């Protein structure tokens, strides 16, 4: 199974992902509801995720800030950046996101994107 760190402040969306991801062979090994928690959780994990699924708009520390901090910890980290705000695309890629996807995204497309990135 592919291991991911799921970062999104929308609790309902996290529940949906937690229900659907195992069906696609994806194991959520840690969840975070803001960027600060994402960095803290990443540092605590003994086994690192294959992919981080990162939202943009979150309290305390947004996805851009969290991605930048995670890249400082692990320059090889693979981040899929999800946002309904396409204006953050170039900035997300500039700070180290591997892929930018616009919300909403079809779940099968997301599964395939996660699998493809994890295999690189």
Image (cartoon, rainbow, N blue to C red):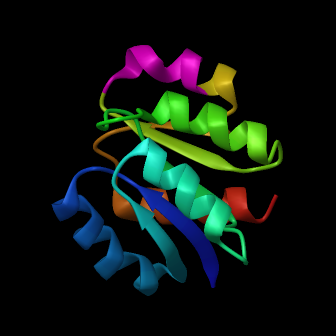
Q: Tell me if 63 is positioned left or right of 9 in this view.
A: right
The correct choice, above or below, for 96 with respect to 105 in the image is above
40 and 89: which one is in front? Answer: 40
Q: Give the range drawn in magenta.
A: 85-92
Q: Residue at x 50, y 22 (%)?
A: 89
Q: Residue 84: x and y, percent?
A: 30, 31
116 and 74: which one is in front? Answer: 74
Residue 22 location, quadrant: bottom left
Asked whether residue 113 appears in the rendered view, the answer is no
Q: Residue at x 50, y 53 (%)?
A: 38
Q: Residue 112: x and y, percent?
A: 56, 63
The correct choice, above or below, for 49 with respect to 69 in the image is below
72 and 76: which one is in front? Answer: 72
Q: Which residue is drawn at 59% across and 37% down?
A: 67
Asked whether residue 103 appears in the rendered view, the answer is yes
Q: Does the magenta stretch include residue 5?
A: no
The correct choice, above or below, for 108 with respect to 1 in the image is above
Q: Residue furthest left?
A: 12
Residue 113 location, quadrant: bottom right
Q: Tell me if 120 is positioned left or right of 40 in this view.
A: right
Q: In which quarter of the image is the C terminus?
A: bottom right
Q: Which secondary structure dominates the residues rendered in magenta?
A: helix
Q: Which residue is drawn at 29% across and 37% down?
A: 59
Q: Residue 11: x and y, percent?
A: 20, 61
Residue 88 location, quadrant: top left
Q: Residue 96: x and y, percent?
A: 70, 31
Q: Quadrant of the N terminus?
A: bottom right
């Amino acid at each position: 199974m592919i291991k991911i760190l799921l970062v999104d402040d929308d609790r309902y969306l996290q529940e949906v992902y937690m229900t659907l991801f195992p069906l696609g062979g994806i194991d959520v090994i840690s969840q975070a509801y803001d960027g600060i928690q994402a960095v803290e959780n990443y540092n605590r994990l003994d086994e690192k995720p294959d992919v981080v699924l990162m939202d943009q708009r979150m309290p305390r520390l947004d996805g851009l800030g969290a991605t930048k901090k995670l890249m400082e910890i692990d320059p090889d980290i693979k981040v899929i950046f999800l946002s309904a705000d396409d204006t953050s695309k170039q900035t997300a890629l500039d700070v180290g996101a591997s892929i930018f996807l616009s919300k909403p995204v079809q779940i099968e497309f997301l599964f395939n994107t996660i699998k493809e990135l994890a295999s690189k």
